[in-house]
Image: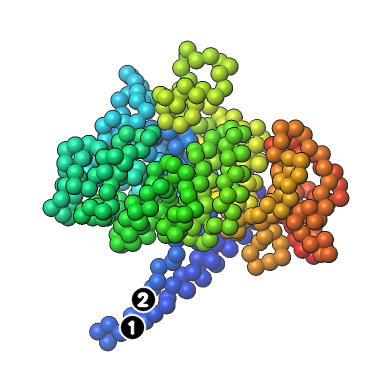
Amino acid sequence: MKPSIHRSLNKGRLILLCCLTLAACVTSSRVNGQEAVAHAPVPLANKPLMGWNSFDSYGVYLYQEAAMANLEAFAEKLAPHGYEYFIIDAGWFGEFKLKEGTIYPAEKHAENMNFNKYGLLLPSHTYFPQGLQPIIDRCHALGLKFGVHLMRGIPREAVRLNLPIKGTSLHAQDIADTTSICTWCAQNYGVDMSRQGSREFYNSVINHLAAWGVDFIKYDDITQYPREIEAVENAIAQCGRPIVLSLSAGKPSTKSNLPVYRRANLLRVTADIWDTQSSIDQTFEAWRKWNGENRPGFWIDMDMIPFGQLLKMSPKPKTTAANEDNQESAIVAFAGKGYNRQSNFTKDQMLTFITQRALSASPLMMGGDLPTLDQFSLELITNFDMLECNQNGVMGRLVYESKGIEIWLTPEQGTADGWIGIFNRSNKLNASAFSVKDLGLDPANSYTFKDIWNKSIFVPADRYEIGPNGVIFLKYLKQ
C-alpha cells in the first residue's frame, strides 16, 4: 500500500470524527446563570468494527506476556490502518490446571474460576498474575479500545456458595436457573429474569467491567435468550460508560429476535469459523440469510479472520499421525479446532475470505497471532481497497448465480460507484467472460473496472480464469 493512500484514509476518518463531534452538540441550557452545552454521545459502531480477538490464536488460554506482545504488534501493524478493538476472548478468569513444567493447559475449560465475593469475575492468577489493568491502560494509552468475552449467566460455583448479589439482600440461588445451561461450557447457569435480583446481578456485572475501563463485551451463548440480552443491554445503558455489545451465538441466531438484537452492536450469525472450505461455505449461507439486516450501529458478524498462526497453546502431540489434517480429536482436549498451525487456507481461499468480508460489511476481527503474522496475511487485512469497501458499511447483494459462479455487488454510499466480487464457488478452475449486466450494472451506462487483487484493468468482454474457490475483486467507477 502506498503511504499517500494511508494518509488519505486516515485524513478521511479524521474529518468524519470532527463532523460527528460537532454534530454531538445538540442542546443547551442555563445552569446557575451560565450557558451550558449538552453533548449527545456519538453513536457507537457507526461502521463495521475492526480489531483483533485472541480466540483463533490462543483459544481460551491467552496469558499476560502474549497479550502484551499482541497488543504492541496490533499498535504497530493494524492500528495505522484503522483497527481499534483489542479483545481478550474466554478464559481470562480461569485458574487452569497446567501440564507440568509448562504454561500449556491440562483442561479444556477451567474448572476453577476467579471471582470476588459477589460472584463477579476477576483475572486469572494463572495467566494474568498482574491482572488485566496494565493491558487495559496500555490499550488506552495507545488510543485503542479494550474488550473481553463473557458467558451468559452466573458462575455455578457462585451459586453453590450462594454468594450475595451486589447491592441487594438477595443471593445467587435466588436468581439462578439451574436448568439453563450451555452445552459446551459447564461454568455458568443461566439467570431467571422473572426473579427479583436478576437485573441487579447483570447491572453489577457490567458496572464491574465498566470500572476497569472495558470498551467492548462479547457475550456468548446468549442469542437464544432475549430476556438476558435485554438485561445486558439495559445494564450497559445504566453503567455510565459507552460499551460495544457483541452477541455471540452459542446456538443459532434467529430473525424473530431481531428487535432485541438490534439494541446490541454486533450479531454473530455463524458457528465458529476456521481455516476450512466448509467455514467459507457457511459464511456464504449466512450472507444470504441475513442480507440487508445490518445498519449503522448494528452489524451482521460472520466471526473472526483465521489467518496467520493459529492455536499457539495447543501444540500437536508427538503421538498424532503426521498426515492427520482435521485433528477433530483435539476438540475434546482443547478449545478451538485442531492444533497449532499456520492457517490451512490456500491463497485463493484467503482472497475469497477477505473479499467476502469487505463486500458483506462484516466486522473485521483478525484472529491469528500478530507478532508472527506473515506478510501476505498482513497485506490482505490492511489492503486499502478492501478496507474502503468494508468501511463503506453496505452489505452487498447477490446479482448473478450460474454454474458455480456467484457475483455479489456492493454500491458505494453517495456515489454511482462500488465494488463487485466474482466468486468461483467450485473446486475446479473456471474460465468465463462476464457482461456488464452479469455484474449487476446497467449496460446503458459506461464503467471502468479495477481488478484489485491483480492490480490491473478488468474488461467484462474478456475471458478470465478464476482458481478453485477463488475470486476476482473489482472496484467499478461509472463514467
Instruction: Answer whether residue 341 is visible to the viewer in this image.
Output: yes
The answer to which quarter of the image holds residue 124 is: top left
Residue at the image position 73 percent from the left and 40 percent from the top: 404
Q: Are marks 1 and 2 in contact (CB under 8 Å)?
A: yes
Residue at the image position 36 percent from the left and 38 percent from the top: 182
In the drawing, what numbered circle is on residue 29? 1
Query: Above or below — where is 49 with respect to 429?
Result: below
Q: Which residue lies under the disc numbered 2?
A: 38
In this picture, residue 230 sits left or right of residue 174: right
Q: The disc labelled 1 sits on which kind of residue?
A: Ser
In this picture, residue 133 sits left or right of residue 477: left
Q: Residues within 10 Å of mark 1 (few under 14, many from 20)?
A: few
In this picture, residue 287 sits left or right of residue 311: right
Residue at the image position 74 percent from the left and 36 percent from the top: 467
Query: Above or below — where is 429 with respect to 151?
Result: above
Q: The disc labelled 2 sits on which kind of residue?
A: Ala
